[in-house]
Image: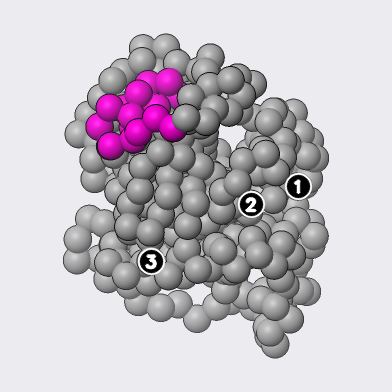
Amino acid sequence: MNIAIISYSKDKASTNIKENLVNNFDFNGLDEKFDNNNIFQTTIDNNIIKLYTISSEHIYTDDLDKKINADLFVFISKHSAVEGRPSLTCHPIGNFGKAEKGGKERTLCPVDSILLKNIFIELNKNSDDPDYEITMEATHHGPFMEKPVLFVEIGSTEKEWVDGNAGKVIAKSIINAIGKYNEESTIIKKFNEKNIINNNILEKQSFSGRRKSKTFSSKSKINESKNNNYESVFVIGGGHYNYTANKTMLKSNLAVGHICAKYNLENLDEGLIKEAMEKTIPKPKFVLLEWKGLGKEKRRIVELLEKNNIKYERSDKFFENCE
């Protein structure tokens, strides 16, 4: 599989991660260039990884997947937050509402939930700095792309953006996560080859209401499958720094795809629910509701799911089996 890692030349965190990739993971310079910048390449098993540098800001580079030939895209970036908390984050992209920071209004991008889970697990395993919070962020911002894409970021001030150790942790986590690929790459290739949105997941549902919970192992801090034997899920509710998604990634065999935070619930309708599920790879079998984080939208969201015969589970009930 061909994987593109995208760095932005004017982003200090992005440059930090890029330098750690080149210096620590056998990337070699190629004769070709992109956007007047050097391209680097390495290979892990059957995965060809190319590291590109772009001269335009990440979030506004719509349709980059039409200019770079790759099956999957990983953007390395800075994260900014008013609180200024040191953080290592990752997340899907797209907009449940207005396109205020790139992308298209009310449009989501495809996301590989298993790669996202493996990167998040690796971040938790590789970071030994207690000052850094490691967290999933809700789906937000651009660019718009039709191929699977995700962001991995260092936050939240210049001090952290240039922290070489933080850059190394992210570089190592991305490489280790890609190294876990097996059958996943086949799923991604099929998604891209078809270049269509498959909604069989909804057509095959013949009932509505709560999904019967499974019991998951919690013998260790992180529930990790050596075979990537994970099931995807769409998380609805909770904060932007989504602790339900964090717990799901670390304590269950579920891989979180898109996340609709509480502040976007008023924008969530039948079309966006279906799109979030259809653009998560592999296709989710149910929705996980952050029950206490749905606010006044709780009843409406539940009715939408039941009307469309989409399985769902309350997070509070679900995690009773993970404790």
Query: Looking at the picture, how far across and down is residue 280, in whole percent?
Result: 60, 60
Q: Earlier in the sequence, mark 3 or mark 1?
A: 1
Q: Nearer the viewer, residue 42 or 278?
A: 42
Q: Looking at the image, is mark 1 or mark 2 nearer the viewer?
A: 2
- Left or right relative to 155: residue 236: right
Residues at marks 2 and 3 touching, judged by CB atoms closer than 8 Å: no
Kind of residue indicated by mark 2: Lys
Residue at 28%, 37% (x, y): give it.
26
| Element at label 2 | loop
Q: Nearer the viewer, residue 129 or 51?
A: 51
Q: Which residue is mark 3?
A: 182
Q: Which residue is mark 1?
A: 107
Query: Looking at the picture, how far across and down is residue 198, in whole percent?
Result: 71, 71
Q: Main secondary structure of the magenta part?
A: helix
- Left or right relative to 108: residue 54: left
Q: Which residues are drawn in magenta?
A: 14-30
Residue at 80%, 40% (x, y): give it.
105
Can you name the residue that lies furthest to the top here? 158
**Residue 293 shows in the view:** no
Residue at 72%, 35% (x, y): give it.
62
Q: Earlier in the sequence, mark 1 or mark 2?
A: 1
Coloured how? one colour
Q: Nearer the viewer, residue 256 or 35?
A: 35
**Residue 100 shows in the view:** yes
Q: Which residue is mark 2?
A: 147
Q: Looking at the image, is mark 3 or mark 1 nearer the viewer?
A: 3
